[in-house]
Amino acid sequence: METGKKPFDYFSKIMDEEMISNLTICSNEYFSKNYSYDETKIYKRDSLCFTYSKSKITEQEIKKFFAVSMIMGLNKIPEKELYWSKKPLYTNIIPKIISRNRYRLLNAAFKLENVDISEITDRKDKSFSKIKSFIENLQKKFLNLYPLETKLTIDEALVFFRGRSEMIFYIPKKPHKWGFKIHILAASESSYCYKFYFDKGNSENCKTLNIIKQLSFDIPSGHHIYLDNWYNSSDVSNYLILKGINLTGTINLNRKGLNKDYIDVSDNIKINITNENFNLFQYKDKRTVNILSTMGYETEYVYNDKTGKTRPDFINDYVMNMRGVDRINQNAYYYKNKFRSIKWWKRVFFYLLEVVMNNSFILFTKENQNVRMSRLKFREDIIESLLDSTKIYEENLLTRTLYKVNLQKPIMNIEKIHNLMKIGKKNKRGRCKFCSKPIKYVCKECSDEKKENLFLHPECFTKFHLERKIYL
């Protein structure tokens, strides 16, 4: 690469160390309240087999969590538990990266924000506070990292969710009819996401004019925005014209403030130029399409290379520049982590993580135009970099080597020799001091407060001693 930068460098411009550090702090606060191990309590193993742990979540484990979630999108298996199955059919790399119980704990304790909601009165604002600061941080980085293109698209994305939430929308014409609505401002050509607005469904903020104001607030004059008929109206066009922004989009003729007297230009084309700030075009092919635009289009036909047919200039311009958000949604679902969650904000987070991957790829291709790389290869490089940054390969190799030694030869210490021994059949099993699993192995040289031998699982033997720095 000419710039000498790897794909992970562009990913880390958005998901930087500061953001990962904040996620780690929030997750640890939630972890300490719910999943921190307390020696005074007796824990029951529930149906999910959560392992209560003394060790807090680290930044490296958050990176592992991201990497494993991305691997699940690449290597799709019917059930999440099967990633840790010993059957040859489900062989994959995830068990070498993280244990099943630790992943469950990370998944349960992962938190974006810990906010005091006692002072918030509105129920929807209370729910949205769980993800609000994360969204604000993302949007600041999106706007600063990539220059605004001249032609922009505003469209909606529906993040599928069928759980309980006050902010769910039902859109019957969508492939996934239930979910959270996110309005996106994206580049028409490159499909880079500049800004997005999470729709909470409030009566005032849900109005199209207010949404356009939120998304176009930072756009200077001279740009061109493309909309569909859900957003477009005479009020929206007048607002954008005052800002010096051009507009083109389909429109429903039942909107207020429209003069609908068309003049026939040809058999399939009609035009209306009587409105003050915009023109109306009508084209009839298989069905009638109405276009509102502040641009003066020619009514000549333009040849379309894909279909081999001709269509008017204003239709061709709209179709070619209205696909920015659709490409983002398309790329987000290629390698999406399909597993469900009761927590609604996790669905939104993983969708936004795919938007981060999309923007990172566009930043990479812009600065490395001579380097050919597919989105799949780009994702693979980021996963490998996330795992390399956690030194997972070295840790895994060390753990597996010591584990083999534990069952055959004792590991030397300056003062003592620590050896793992299996107790007889007549003796009762005990709980592992590290993971609380029932086990019949003990360390002869270690003892608890009652001066009895410590029960340790073979897999926990090395980890327990390394944590206490018994080995040198």
Image (cartoon, rainbow, N blue to C red):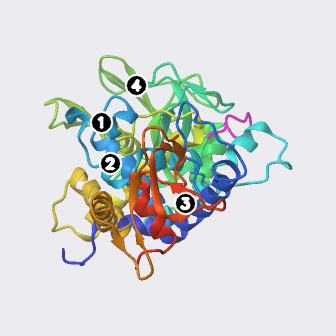
Q: Secondary structure at mark 1?
A: loop
**Contact between labelled residues 1 and 2, with CB atoms less than 8 Å apart:** no
Q: Which residue is mark 1?
A: 76
How crowded pointer 2 is (Cα within 10 Å; few <14, some 14-19, many 20+) is rated as: some
Residue 28: x, y in percent?
Answer: 62, 59
Q: Which mark is residue 213?
A: none
Query: Which marked residue is nearer to the observer: mark 1 or mark 3?
Result: 3
Amino acid found under the numbered disc labelled 2: Ile
Which residue, given by chain and number where applicable, does mark 4 sit on?
289
From the viewer's side, name the closer residue of 328 and 463: 463
**Front residue (pair 46, 164):** 46
Residue tagged by mark 2? 94
Residue contact between numbered discs 1 and 3, judged by CB atoms under 8 Å: no
Q: Earlier in the sequence, mark 2 or mark 3?
A: 3
Image-quadrant location for residue 139: bottom right
Left or right: where 16 falls relative to 199: left
How busy is the neighbourhood of tag 1: few (under 14 within 10 Å), some, or many (20 plus)? some
Task: Kindly identify the amino acid type of the residue bearing the numbered disc 1.
Answer: Lys
Q: Residue at x 68, y 43 (%)?
A: 42
Residue type for callout 4? Val
Q: For the residue marked with disc 3, what is the amino acid?
A: Ile
Q: Earlier in the sequence, mark 1 or mark 3?
A: 3
Instruction: Say whether marks 2 and 3 touch (CB < 8 Å).
Output: no
Q: Residue at x 59, y 65 (%)?
A: 22
The quarter of the rendered structure image containing the N terminus is bottom left
SS for dot 3: loop
